[in-house]
Image (cartoon, rainbow, N blue to C red):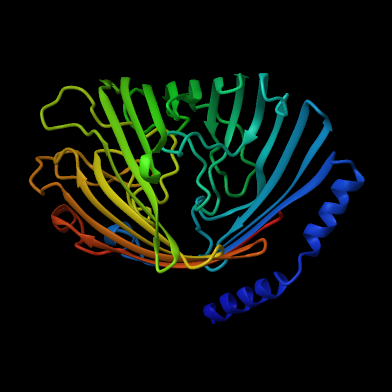
Amino acid sequence: MKYKWLIAFLAVSAAFAQEDPLAEWNARLLESTHGIFGFTFEERTRWEEKDGVNFGKSVDQQDMLSRIRPGAEIKPLNWLKIDVMGQDARAPFYGANAPNTMRDPMDLEQAYVELFGERKTGFGAEFGRELLTYGEARVIGSTPWTNTDRTFDNARLYYRTDKDRYEILMVSPVKVQEDHWSQPDLGERLWGTYDTFANLWRGASFDVYALRHSQNLIGGWTGPGTLGTDSFGGRVYGKLPGQFVYDLEGIGQAGHMGTLDQRAYAWFSGVRRPVTAFHKLLDLSAEYKLASGTKLGESYSATYDQLMPANHDKFGREDLFGWRNLKTFKSLETYHFSKVFALNLMYCDDYLFSASDSLYNSQGKSLAVSPKGLAGTHVGQELDSFVTYKYGANLFGAGFGHFFKGQFIEMTTKDINPRYFYVFQEYTLP
């Protein structure tokens, strides 16, 4: 019965994609209001099956996830924009206890004001509730794959030149309250500066940032004391001869993690290159990243605080791990059969940085630990394959992922290889 629901929905979506009356009506509305007022709309449905959830600690899942996002964009003046978007996220077959990563009946996902955003230079500002992504979302990012997504209550002031942007920000992730309107909660917040410099030297661009991450009991901190880490990071990215594209990022951390001093770091390095295979485009990429962990006998915390990232795809499609106490090699190959149809193959190989620190999930919480470091460091390998097909404003996709356990998983969990299968459809108003 559950598959009939999925097949019927995809059939209706495919039929709807033959024409797009909603987009035509919205275009007429924008034209009649001289660009002052227009609607936004997004709809997504995903069927997914997960086996070996939390490496056997939780029950297997078969879920239909649905999400609808109606909104509006208003530009009454050339220096003022108001953006509002609601979100209704549901898991209809899960039952009454669906977690807030799956279910949040109609709530306010976005409502912000932007001042002087149309200017290419000079001052600008944004404040309100907003979906945010900085860099490649390893430090700050919304989580669009999650059914409820992460949004932020924020205030940002920036100054732009022709190539540079200097920004002061304060962001706080919204805590989803499933049956109530999600209220601002500054118990967890990230504030500081994030600056970007485009084509500064020989085609290289730079991001430089200094950020303070604070979290107390109200904001979700569960240990003694509070969290207060200071992250100092930089990213350099650009093009090399031979069509290579590179990306490097390093972060050092001080401050405190609970009652312990914090001394941690993280590193990312990646390279990409397009090639031609059978007269079609093939994108090749490889990357290596690590995040430090606390070693046995250390009197301070060396476990990297992953801040507020979007970890989906960073450590495989199954979203098993976070960027803490982990070393990961990842490759991704994308074969473009056409401009709208692509096949992807992803491989990840994961090791613990410290054998005596925890393995952490994508939310940064402990999955398993060998306190004396006797379970080795090899976590395991993940292999994922997925296809995407774009038709007009619709995106269709399906994928499968399998995790191959390493020694650490064998010795510290129920010795299970997680698997993940999904089919999805998404419509976005052009």
Percent coordinates x, y for residue 51 in the rendering: 34, 67
Q: Residue at coordinates 66% horizontally, 40% vertically from top-left? A: 110
Viewer-proximal residue, 218 or 152?
152
Q: Residue at coordinates 54% horizontally, 28% vertically from top-left? A: 171
Q: Residue at coordinates 50% horizontally, 34% vertically from top-left? A: 134
13 vs 253, left or right, is right
* Location of the N terminus (image quadrant): bottom right
**Does 99 appear above or below 387?**
above
Query: Is residue 53 at least partly visible in the picture?
Result: yes
Percent coordinates x, y for residue 390 in the rendering: 59, 64
Viewer-proximal residue, 340 or 214?
340
Query: Is residue 64 at least partly visible in the picture?
Result: no
Percent coordinates x, y for residue 46 in the rendering: 53, 65
**Does 185 appear above or below 9?**
above
**Does 62 appear above or below 365?**
below
Q: Residue at coordinates 67% horizontally, 61% vertically from top-left? A: 393
**Does 319 appear above or below 423?**
above
* Location of the C terminus (image quadrant): bottom right
